[in-house]
Amino acid sequence: MNFENQTTQPPKHPKKFYFLEYFYILLQSIEASSSQSEIFSKFIYLKAKYLLGESRYRKIVSEEDGKNSRRIGRYRYTFKQVLSEAVEYELVITLGSQITIQPMGKQALEIYKNHGQSEFNYFLGQIMEKHYRAFRYLIEKCYQVNANPRNAGLLIFPIYSAYKLEFERDTLQTVSDLKEYFKQLAIRLEQDIEKYLAKKVSLSAKNDELIEDLIKAGFISSSSGHDKFKKDDYNVILKRARDFWLRYFLQDLYQFDISLTSFELWAYRAKQIGILHITEFYPDLNFNGRIIYPLSAIKIQNPNPSFRQLVTYSDQKGLYMHIPVWNDGEEFVNSLHRAYVETRQTAKTYFVSLPAVRERVCYNLKMPEYLFDDYLGRAYRIRDSLKIRISLEVDKLPEKSNLTYLHREPVMVDGRYRNIIAIDLV
């Protein structure tokens, strides 16, 4: 796909939803009816079936109380957002209360039915880049020297709760308690920046700015003494502090010219396509938060078969996604085994976390999660010929937990979810 592109301009803000599957369930709903009310009902049903949340996390189980008015309001908002963006992409067209699929939407449905979710996402990625020009911006920013010259575009976004810095909830009662927590938080962030980004900075002035923002917003008093803040504001105050520092990393340190919300929406969409990777659970980094690194590059041309071209720009450069080829599977299996051994050294058990192994392999081979799942399935089915013994089991399925949202998806192999792995060389 070729189109004009202004490479240095920050992208427009997309509609507020993360999962690209929303486009599929919208198109599937319209396929069954042209009436907006009937489409919306089908949309809600499919939303529950695919366990899609309004945030970037998938739900653990379907919500039974689908008639709750507040919940229906959220669903209707999401529906309107997805529909609006689908109209912009010419996937569908609206005429009054009627919605019909356009030829582009029919093509997208056929791709999903015949080739699956990853190819559907790839097709959507092409359309999105044509309209919003976001992915080139993200990738080029990641590789800029002033972001992270040492680790090939890797960005860190530390997030520390009060508990992680050894502040118990009941010890944070006064303004001075909060200020002490904020001071220790700023010190920890300075240490992370020096350790992972090879930069030495002072965050004292930014910390003062955070406190001043909270004072102006009325959450804390200007007193440095023992004035108490409202208990009901505790979570809001910590969230505002978290977002303040995330914006600092994004806009001040990495010099992105977009809002935190826009960045997160585009980044998590890019992850689903395979353009970059985001994780909050990388096993070898001693900090809490997210890491983001590119799985693609912007180049004039790339004959390497391990790269797949998503788009071509007007300056003849293209966005090339790194898709390691299977060949005989040797490279993947070697990386898989190495990741298992490294994970086992810290876990000290025979079976270890499969998501933790996946994180290591995805980072080492710079491959998207969906490709890891595919290659693991291949390796598992032909494990005898690969001279490797792979055991995949289930420790505790997410739906058996008390969690509401799925933060780390298990791996689907041969139609079954697995979340622990053991490996032996034959």
Image (spheres, helix red, strand yellow):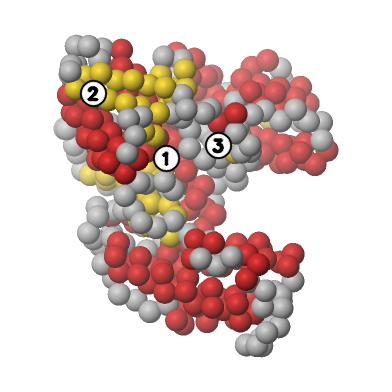
Q: Is residue 63 visible?
A: yes
| Quadrant of the frame with the C terminus | top left
Front-most of residues 71 and 220: 220
Nearer-N-terminus badge (2/1): 1
Sequence-first tag of 3 and 1: 1
Q: Amino acid at mark 2?
A: Asp
The residues bearing labels 3 and 1 have C-alpha atoms spaced at a distance of: 16 Å
Marks 3/2 in contact by CB < 8 Å: the verdict is no
Q: Quadrant of residue 177?
A: bottom right
Q: Residue at x 27, y 25 (%)?
A: 423
Q: Which residue matches tag 1?
A: 271
- Residue 382 location in percent, x, y? 26, 12
- The image shows residue 386, relative to residue 397, as above or below, that is above
**Amino acid identity at mark 3:** Leu
The residue lying at 31 percent from left, 44 percent from top is 346
Residue 120 visible? The answer is no
Q: Position of residue 33 (x, y in %)?
A: 71, 17
User: Where residue 306 appears, x then y in whole percent?
Assistant: 21, 31
Query: Can you give x and y, in whole percent of width and height, for residue 149 in the image?
Result: 23, 60
| Closer mark to the observer between disc 3 and disc 2 | 2
- Residue 325, label in figure: none
Whichever of labels 3 and 2 marks the residue nearer the N terminus, that label is: 3
Numbered tag placed on residue 406 in the rendering? 3
Q: Horizontally, is 225 left or right of 380 in the view?
A: right
